[in-house]
Image (cartoon, coloured by chain):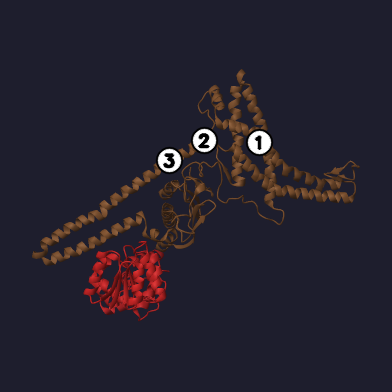
Chain colours: A brown, B red
Amino acid sequence: MVRSEGGGRWPVGGAPIGGPEAVRAQASTQPTDTRRSGRWRAGDWIAVARCQLLSLAALAAWAVGALVVLAILLLPIGVGFALLPSSAAALRRLTDRHRAWAARWSGVRISPPAPLPGEGLTRRRRAVALLGDEGFWRDFGWAWLEPWTGGLLVAVPLALVEYGVFGALVQPFIWRRIDDGNWYAFVPVHSTATMLAALLLGIAFVAAGLRLAPVVLRLHTRLGGRTLSAPRATELVRRIEELTDTRAETLDTQAAELRRIERDLHDGAQARLVALGLTLDQATRLLDTDPQAARELLAEVRATSGRALQDLRELVHGIHPPVLADRGLGDAVRSLALDSFLDVVVAVELPERLPAPVESAGYFAVAELLANAGKHAGAREVAIRLEHDPAHGALRITVTDDGRGGADPARGSGLRGIERRLSAFDGTLALHSPPGGPTTATLEIPCASSSPKTSSCSGTG
Amino acid sequence: MRVVIAEDLFLLRDGLTRTLREHGCEVVAAVDNAPALLRALRDEEPDVAVVDIRLPPTFTDEGLQAALEARRTRPGLPILILSQYVDQLYAQELLAGGEGAIGYLLKDRVTHTAQFVDAVRTVAGGGTVMDPQVIAKLLARSDARGTTAALSPREHEVLELMAEGRSNAAIMNALHIGESAVAKHTAGIFAKLGIEASADDNRRVLAVLAYLKR
């Protein structure tokens, strides 16, 4: 579930973040290939190419859809039982491909349906199970809709570009050889002047097609999101499983925390207070007979009481650092930076105080990452950035160090700990740590977990 | 010496008042919240204020905020902050003005009355007193970064006490060494760290702290 290579972003607790929402834009990851080069942008040409791919895929969808119908029709004579599972699987591969494209091209995550039934079943039972599977029927519906909706939609910019190219590049050379019947769109091409008009018109068509392609691509993704996303019930079941898991983890963590506090008190302050009582008793008995020894014992009592206080201080700091309670996350992280042996630069852009649990999770995550940077990465400089992303109602923390990189959450218990803490918030940890560094850890914590739509990151008193 | 005390717990406020009176200080006001502290600082014009960092109504860092505010209107107003915890960030904020006449101590230090009263007097006299825990953390950081690597172990100890704001006499007592030894060690420290030696005690503390914060 956890990757470390690349700059991947993955949900900590398992399946998709964002809960019941079927489609949700992930961060501000618009496709990165929209580099501008004058008025003709490379991104637009890429979008046209993608439209071409989609239109071919729509043809494939039509073919696979027809295959599925054939399989269903052949069920009565038995052949269908063999054909249905394989054609359903082919259909699922196609829809999976579309979901992957949506994520890669538009940064839109379409939640996948539950896997097709059929693991370890006989062919006959598999076919029957398929006929009762909601995900299969959704795929099937999509296969019949896609050619007429998505397929036609992506054909528009394609047709514009292709017809435009024909007008601009082919018309100038062929019009002399063809007589009066030669028209380009509404222009009768039979002289140099009309040929130039056709050429300009062709360029205009290409420009329009290019301009349209990215828009159409986004529209196509939205359209696909409607039909391709998992049924709401599947989505909710998955969410419940995820919440059950993270709740169990949270309770475990909490119980472990309480055990640790109990043990710390027992071995620390409590033990010292007992020792204090014993020493005081001894000192009282020696007071008359050996005042000098009594004085030494009293000095010991003072030292012990000081250590008991120090134990309590450290315990409280581990539970909830006072500076975090006093000043909030920004200053608490600044305080961490001052304590660190590394050169730490902190940039804080938080409008106001965040909910206390979010602050606490953020604080301990930064503390862990900072410790890792010093201990394992051998870093010298660390940059920490805290910002509130109003679009997603989330706290985003970026920690970058100049260490040797190669951090792997699968091996470090500290990173696992951060993930456990974040999972209770549907938070994510993305780690980019190529060998040789630099390492960038990006944490996102939605401020009101279960319902991203009603997040209230900045609305606490 | 006229002292204002701000502490919200009655027992501690009472104890502080008595301790300071026993050592010949005049406690002109003992208040339990930040607004009253600001009023007392304005009306009584004390020589020094001893302030608990956590005061009502918010019980966060009200005492610190009040102290900083009072020093904005009257720069160099001597204030000694007491706290259950010491935090490097707060230490930095208190030292930021670079004026001295500031102290930051853990509350438990009050139990060493003689040292505590010494600290109050140092702050009243324009000096700087930082809790050993603040200094220990600063020194640990400097050691890890290698900025104090050139010092001998003894010089390291002397540097620690200097940074806490102790006078030469206090350093002599603490380390059981003579006056000439202290002078030798301080000269060695300044030479090795490249800090400009200063006869003025307070400037010496500030220079050492500035070096350690690098």
Parent chain of label 2 = A
Q: Position of residue A196 (x, y in %)?
A: 85, 51
Mark 3 vs mark 2: tell me if same chain. yes
Q: Which residue is mark 1?
A: A146
Please give left or right for residue A224 compared with residue A198 in the image: left
Q: Are marks 1 and 2 in contact (CB under 8 Å)?
A: no
- Measure the C-alpha gap from mark 1 to mark 3: 36 Å
Question: Taking B65 as reference, is B122 above or below it?
Answer: below
Parent chain of label 3 = A
Q: Which residue is mark 2?
A: A234
Please tell me how crowded label 2 is: few (under 14), some (14-19), or many (20+) other residues with Cα within 10 Å: some
**Image quadrant containing the N terminus of chain B:** bottom left
**Image quadrant containing the C terminus of chain B:** bottom left
- Helix, strand, or loop for circle 3? helix
Between residues A104 and B45, which one lies in front from this camera angle? B45
Please tell me how crowded label 1 is: few (under 14), some (14-19), or many (20+) other residues with Cα within 10 Å: many
Q: Of discs 3 and 2, which sits in the foreground?
A: 2
Q: Which residue is mark 3?
A: A245
Please give left or right for residue B7 compared with residue A109 in the image: left
Q: Position of residue A427 (x, y in %)?
A: 47, 48
N-terminal of the pair, mark 1 or mark 2, is: 1
Type of amino acid at the residue the image marks with label 2 = Thr
- Measure the C-alpha gap from mark 1 to mark 2: 22 Å
Point 29% across, 52% down: residue: A264
Q: Position of residue A366 (x, y in %)?
A: 44, 55
- Measure the C-alpha gap from mark 3 to mark 2: 17 Å
Q: Is residue B197 visible?
A: yes
Point 61% across, 28% down: residue: A87
Q: How many marks?
A: 3
Type of amino acid at the residue the image marks with label 1 = Glu
